[in-house]
Image: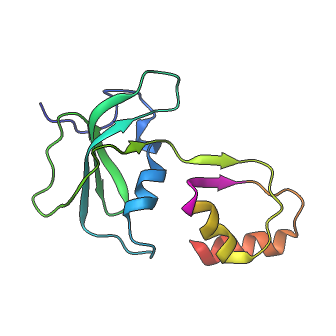
Amino acid sequence: MASTGCTRYHPGMHRLACAALLVVAPASSTFAQSLVVSNVTLIDGTGALAVPGVSLVIEEGRFTAIGADVDPPSDASLIDGTGKFAIPGLMDMHVHLRGGVQALHGYLYSGVTAIYDAGNDPDVIFGLRERER
């Protein structure tokens, strides 16, 4: 059975596994056509048990299917995720951002996909956000 979405494990799963994407995706704004990371253990962040043997299908930088029985695109690059885990992106809701884009890359490298810096100059933060988009 093919999985066309993420509802098999949890309705919000399309936001899942950002950390896995950061590990396997290029560090540029362009993405490979299709990427499949197979046989990972999925931790969805809801408190549910970990699910082994899951495949993640990523097309144009977005998760298009997550499940045990997905049909990978014919042009997909394949990565064996055996022994690896996919988790939701982490959030750090209290940072004092210094270091510009390089600091943001450091957060991403560590699996942090969202940060909140309430004490910085808005022009600096909004300008940085625009440069990273």
Q: Position of residue 40 (x, y in %)?
A: 31, 41
Q: Quadrant of the C terminus?
A: bottom right
Residue at the far top in the pictured view:
48
Q: Position of residue 12 (x, y in %)?
A: 46, 34
Residue at 13% in and 64% down: 75
In the depicted structure, whether residue 72 falls above or below residue 68: below
Q: How many marks?
A: 0
At horizontal 52% and vertical 26% (from top left) the residue drawn is 46
Front residue of 108 and 14: 108
- Residue 38 lies, in percent from the top left, at 24, 46
Colour scheme of this structure image?
rainbow
Q: Quadrant of residue 1?
A: top left
**Frontmost residue, 122 versus 100:** 100
Frontmost residue, 9 versus 37: 37
Q: Looking at this rendering, what residue extends furthest in the front direction?
A: 83
Inspect the magenta stretch and tell me whether residue 113 lies in it.
yes
Q: Which residues are magenta?
A: 109-115
Asked if residue 79 lies left or right of residue 99, the reply is left
Residue 1 forms part of the magenta stretch: no
Question: Could you say where residue 100 lies in the image, as x and y percent from the top left?
Answer: 72, 76
Q: Is residue 116 left or right of residue 67?
A: right
Q: Is residue 59 left or right of residue 30?
A: left
Give the side of residue 122 with respect to residue 11, left or right. Answer: right
Q: Residue at x 65, y 47 (%)?
A: 91
Relative to 13, does residue 28 appear above or below in the rendering?
below
